[in-house]
Amino acid sequence: MSMLEAAKRQLEDAYPFAEIDEESWLKLQYPQKTLQVAIPMRHDDGSLKMYMAYRSQYNDTMGPCKGGIRFHPKVDRDHVEALGFWMTFKCACVKVPFGGSKGGVCVDANSLSHRELERLSKAYIDAFVDFIGPDTDIPAPDVATDERVMGWMYSEYRKIKGGHPKAVITGLPVALGGIEGRSSATGYGGYYCLENVIAHRDELNLKVTGPIDVAVQGFGKVGYWFCEKLAKDKRYRVIAVSNEYSGVYMDTSGPAFDPDLAMKCLQESNWRDWGQGLPISNDDLLSIECDVLVPAAIENVITKDNANTVRARVVLELANGPTTNDGDAILNERGVVVVPDILANAGGVIVSYFEWLQNRNAQQKTVEEVDKGLKEMVTYATERTIARKNKYKIPSLRTSAYALALKRIGMANECLGTFHYFKR
Ligand code: NAD
């Protein structure tokens, strides 16, 4: 089954709870547009290589499409279409007035030199310059792309289009129109979402008492900032972190987890010389005893093969699509509260929306204003998702989040004109 087909199964579960008309439902079954380009790129040694690049605009009913650009060897058409699908429902779930899209290049970014990476980033914009735009489709960073890459991409876009169209890309460097607080937004948004879930623990039949132990897979842009926020709140303990190569299981009687020290030790020795905790494998981290398990790296890490071994009471999906449908069914059956990606990791797109507004209006927000707005929007979306789950007796938060998003997209689509709308 393709990644998009698997993603669409999640939507089907939500259909009975969404009160959406047939035409709106039909339109949501297909990506609206996908552009595939073979990009020739000259390497530092003079050789020319071809890279497959994509941009998919899944649905723009709610507004201009919004989604990151990923540089990863697994990127293909199906991959970006599925990720664009998730963006569509994520934006609708948290009430950000954007549609959903995603882009990417099939490349191992680590294999490129600094100059090659710059060339590829600019070549991506050359290829997609008329496909994106501040009112049509707004890219942002994703796996293996960052504000530096966004700066290069913006520079190329501006060179071609002229003027200062800063709202074409979000996640820009702050000096170039980026917003304070964007880098931490997804991690902090995950924390605010978790806070709200814990606050509704009785309704969700969630048993967490005492210090809340958290294990985090992936210590990149999302994982680091999530841990940094938890480390400031004494009610939580980060007890394990990992990446694709290794991990550390903290000794809870020792010093508290220090995210900056963890990042330094990761960069210096891949945690080998940290001197705290015990080594743990990336796979074993998923089954350690904890309150909250946070997949914050890649897709499909919790599957039918390991979902039975998960010993957390909550799975907070900060990565996109970390749980397969089979894995999700097992977790639900076992009473694990799964906080779905389209809600849990929406902090990034919320603050991207603030950045887009900032650059359209030539106004600036302070980091305090950004954080306040982020917290309000995540809290509202989490509360609405939980309330809908309770009201309609929906079996999972995932289905409830999709039902909320579907209903909103359906209402907007009806206003654009459907058979049902005119008949009324
Ligand atoms: P990143 O590239 O900064 O970090 C990814 C981290 O995961 C790194 O620590 C890497 O070593 C680790 N990793 C890679 N493969 C792994 C594996 N097989 N097992 C364990 N760890 C692995 O990327 P990021 O921006 O932190 O994104 C992480 C996830 O969050 C992705 O699924 C992304 O789509 C999603 N996401 C990111 C944002 C954002 O604002 N950056 C927003 C929403 C969702």
Image (cartoon, rainbow, N blue to C red):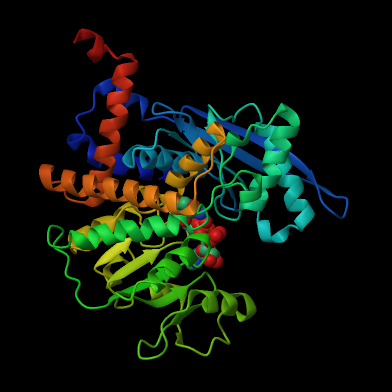
Q: Is residue 58 visible?
A: yes
Could you tell me residue 239's position as x and y percent?
A: 38, 79
Q: Is residue 237 above or below residue 351?
A: below
Name which residue lies at 30% across and 37% down: 405
Q: Is residue 329 left or right of residue 295?
A: left
Q: Is residue 126 visible?
A: no
Q: Is residue 63 left or right of residue 49?
A: left
Q: Residue pushed farthest right?
A: 46
Q: Is residue 321 above or below residue 199?
A: above
Q: Quadrant of residue 319?
A: bottom left
Could you tell me residue 307's position as x and y percent?
A: 30, 65
Q: Is residue 261 left or right of residue 152?
A: left
Could you tell me residue 282's position as x and y percent?
A: 46, 73
Q: Quadrant of residue 4?
A: top left
Question: 265 or 28: which is nearer to us?
Answer: 265
- Image quarter where the C terminus lies is top left
Q: Is residue 395 left or right of residue 345?
A: left
Q: How many marks?
A: 0
Q: Is residue 190 above or below residue 357?
A: below
Could you tell me residue 140's position as x and y percent?
A: 56, 44
Q: Quadrant of residue 268?
A: bottom right
Name which residue lies at 46% across and 44% down: 83
Question: 39 or 218: which is nearer to us?
Answer: 218
Name which residue lies at 67% across and 52% down: 148
Name which residue lies at 55% across and 81% down: 271
- Image quarter where the N terminus lies is top left
